[in-house]
């Protein structure tokens, strides 16, 4: 059985190392990026450069996209010279961007109409996870497509979970981003109240880690806030985008998620202050600023 | 060195098993409860019944209180026949109730004025932790008083943390309750959005447990919500009381804790529906109800 030929579109801070891991795992690879010179490092390792999303689809059996946001995904799949100009029966389209569940379902429907298939497979783990091939991958789509893609995912990630039909990967990612954002805020409200009460936030963090308030966010982001280390990490502007996806899905489904709405709004304030490129743990700093206290 | 004589006031669902553990550890024990017949089971095991908080103080070197709320604490310490009618130099007063940091500081000041000392030492771990002697104990007060009380705490708890001066134990408990409440709500918003999106909330919980969204609340309360098991556990009306303490402290210190305020408000709605005696994980049910969906 020969390895499927993979076309990879979107060679940013996440996509480039993910594509490199596919190359190292032995997959024949065609690559495309809007800013073409980003293709060069992969070409020098054996990948083939493709002129457009459509040309990438022509050269591959499996097309992977890793793009910044939902409009980019829409354009790469459905735009001029987009992937869907050349989708043929048997093609597998895998969008690993964090995008809306709605666009995942639209891609899936268009793929199925052409005798092809698709998966939505957003990731978490950041650029470090992308480099080390240890991403968490949340997958929506058919069991058949998931099994077909499994060896490809295994070259890029470790915790690979199939959570349901088309769109389910994006829904799972949105849920993940809700829980992470709200837990950061929970830790922030606690640590700021402690500090303003004259109690050492570091001791409070330590005490809480031993009980029911334990979380990875309390451990990692709590410590970040105490040390005032807000270099990313995961940029607050990207997390805001992810919460916007969750809020849009919630509106379409008439779901009340009031804390998510409040934290999204707080991220607006952080971007207004010029902190969009800081780590999302800066939510804790924002709470401290509002209380006029320094918890570091 | 003889064991200190302990007076224990407040023999409710938490206090009675805590007092029993002190008795079993060999401490001479006087007990008092407003409803006097609750003293009987401890008297039958060797404790001495005391007529009032004042009489309990007379009979003991260390006085422990375990009461429902801040007004009860105020009454037992400062009311007619209260502890402070008989506090003498060398007495150690330990309030293990969950009460306001302000009352803890007031008790401390009154104790010090009489040549005595005090600790605020609220717990978490529930009635099961009280019975098995595995409570987490968060302690505020002097290092000397903490060291003096340590063997007493060790008879009742496992994770015993000294977080600062008088009031710091109550502040730490308030922080703990903020983080737990907001994390339950975070998990709820995620699972309800998943379900309404047509994605199995059980798979989402499983996927999220493997990554950065991990928490004990996602593990335990997430599973409770999936199984619709809302028998307590920790009653939502008690958690509402604890958030009210946090909100009062925040108001006194001008600290903005918006998510805590929102979740407290949601607990008001749960009590209005008659769910005050259900487990606090019923916050997730409330979100499901608002979205007109059943996540179990």
Image (spheres, coloured by chain):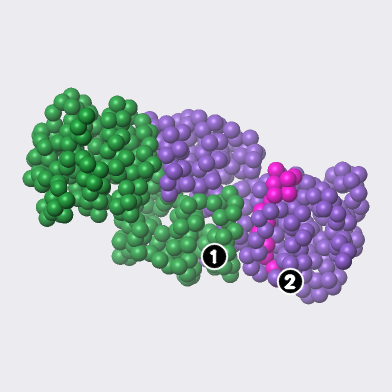
Chain colours: A green, B purple
Residue nearest the observer in this picture, A280 or B248: A280
Q: What residue is pinned by disc 2?
A: B144
How packed mark 1 is, by other alpha carbons closer than 10 Å (few <14, some 14-19, many 20 or more), is many
Residue nearest the observer in this picture, A175 or B4: B4
Quadrant of the snapshot with the N terminus of chain A: top left
Residue at x 48%, y 41% (from the top left corner):
B188
Pointer 1 and pointer 2 on the same chain: no
Highlighted magenta segment, given as a residue range: B128-142
Label 1 marks which chain's residue?
A
Label 2 marks which chain's residue?
B
In magenta segment, residue A34 = no
SS state under label 1: helix
SS state under label 2: helix
Residue B221, horizontal then vertical, whole percent: 55, 40
How packed mark 2 is, by other alpha carbons closer than 10 Å (few <14, some 14-19, many 20 or more), is few
Residue nearest the observer in this picture, A143 or A228: A143
Q: What residue is pinned by disc 1?
A: A202
């Amino acid at each position: 059985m020969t390895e499927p030929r993979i076309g990879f579109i979107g060679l940013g801070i996440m996509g480039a190392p993910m594509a490199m891991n596919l190359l190292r795992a032995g997959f024949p690879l065609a690559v495309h990026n809007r800013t073409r010179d980003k293709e060069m490092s992969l070409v020098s390792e054996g990948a083939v450069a493709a002129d457009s999303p459509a040309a990438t689809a022509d050269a591959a059996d499996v097309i992977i996209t890793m793009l910044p946001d939902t409009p980019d995904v829409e354009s790469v799949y459905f735009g001029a010279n987009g992937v869907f100009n050349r989708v043929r029966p048997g093609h597998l389209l895998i969008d690993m961007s964090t995008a809306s569940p709605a666009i995942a379902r639209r891609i899936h429907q268009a793929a199925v109409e052409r005798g092809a298939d698709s998966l939505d497979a957003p990731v978490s783990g950041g650029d470090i996870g992308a480099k080390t091939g240890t991403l968490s991958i949340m997958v929506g789509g058919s069991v058949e497509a998931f099994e077909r893609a499994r060896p490809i995912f295994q070259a890029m990630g470790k915790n690979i979970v199939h959570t349901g039909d088309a769109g389910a990967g994006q829904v799972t990612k949105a849920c993940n981003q809700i829980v992470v954002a709200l837990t950061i805020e929970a830790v922030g409200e606690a640590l700021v109240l402690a500090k303003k009460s004259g109690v050492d936030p570091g001791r409070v963090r330590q005490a809480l880690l031993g009980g029911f308030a334990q979380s990875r966010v309390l451990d990692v982001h709590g410590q970040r806030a105490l040390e005032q280390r807000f270099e990313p990490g995961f940029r607050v502007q990207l997390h805001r985008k992810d919460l916007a996806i969750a809020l849009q899905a919630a509106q379409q489904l008439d779901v009340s998620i009031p804390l998510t709405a409040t934290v999204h709004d707080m991220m607006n304030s952080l971007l207004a202050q010029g902190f969009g490129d800081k780590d999302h743990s800066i939510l804790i700093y924002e709470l401290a600023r509002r209380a006029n206290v320094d918890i570091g």
